[in-house]
Amino acid sequence: MKRLNDVLGYENLKIYQDDEFFTFSLDSIILANYCNIRLRDKKVADFCSGNGIVSLILTKRTLATIDGIEIQKKLYDLALKSIKYNNLEKRIKMFNEDVKVFSKNHLNYYDAVVCNPPYFKIESNNKKNECFEKMVARHEIKINLAEVCLCAKKVLKDNGSLTIVHRSDRLMDILTEFRKNNIEPKRIKFIYESINKISTLIVIEGQKNGKAGLIIEKPLIMFNEDGTYTMEYGLLQREVRK
């Protein structure tokens, strides 16, 4: 069922979603809030943009133009509806394309790339969702981590940034692919459900042809020991429509 939701925490910003196959999650909210978009950045690419939630939020954080690239037509169409509803046609442009094809036609073009990619390898034992759209969003069916990093390398200008949100257990894969593509890791933020549990998510930023020097940022812990939201997570959680 298609529905129009508020993006809570962002005044006058709404998004179209479809409960039958995909709604945005906290991962996208984390990426949109913690990616480092510099004042000088003029062009941003949102790889695997889904229904456009990251691009929508970024219009509140930067004056840069944002290009969303989404291979799935249903998600692309939802993003177009949200962009039109919010009168953001001049800020966001959507492309219903494969990121791998798109990158060949936009070499050295962007100041920053953000991406919430599929998390799970095809050969993993993770149970695939029966809905094909969800399978593509969550599993490396149409694009994998190595391809995301290679495509980012192609489209980024020198010193441009790539920021992704991903599972913590893929950290070594991410660092390997960053370095393989001359994207120097610069910042990592670990996400924990609580102080007593292992990290489940990470946000990692790299810089194309950047100098060595990695900052491990203060972690985001979601819940206090009594089960209540931490202050930082509570502010983010306000933005997720249940």
Image (cartoon, rainbow, N blue to C red):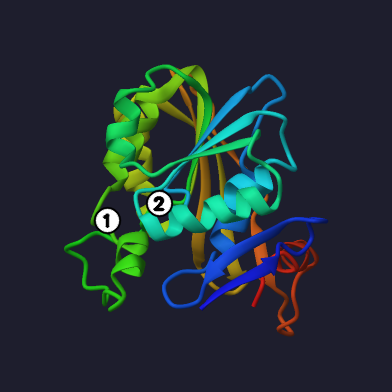
**Circle 2 sits on which residue?**
117
Compared across the picture, whether 194 is left or right of 213 comes to right
Kind of residue indicated by mark 1 = Glu
**Circle 1 sits on which residue?**
140
Relative to 171, is 109 above or below?
A: above
- Which mark, by number, is residue 239? none
Q: Residue at x 28, y 39 (%)?
A: 147
Compared across the picture, whether 183 is left or right of 159 comes to left
The quarter of the rendered structure image containing the C terminus is: bottom right
Labels 2 & 1 near each other (Cβ < 8 A): yes
The x and y percentages for residue 6 are 72, 66
Relative to 107, is 168 above or below?
A: below
Of callouts 2 and 1, which one flags the residue occurring earlier in the amino acid sequence? 2
Marks 2 and 1, how far apart in space?
Answer: 8 Å
The x and y percentages for residue 224 are 73, 76
Q: Residues within 10 Å of mark 1 (few under 14, many from 20)?
A: some
Q: Residue at x 62, y 30 (%)?
A: 65
SS class of the residue under badge 1? loop
Q: Residue at x 58, y 34 (%)?
A: 66
SS class of the residue under badge 2? loop
The x and y percentages for residue 232 are 76, 61
**In-front residue for pair 62/15:** 15
Relative to 188, is 201 above or below?
A: below
Q: Quadrant of residue 98?
A: top left
The answer to whether residue 172 is seen in the rendering is yes
Kind of residue indicated by mark 2 = Pro
Residue reaching furthest bottom? 226
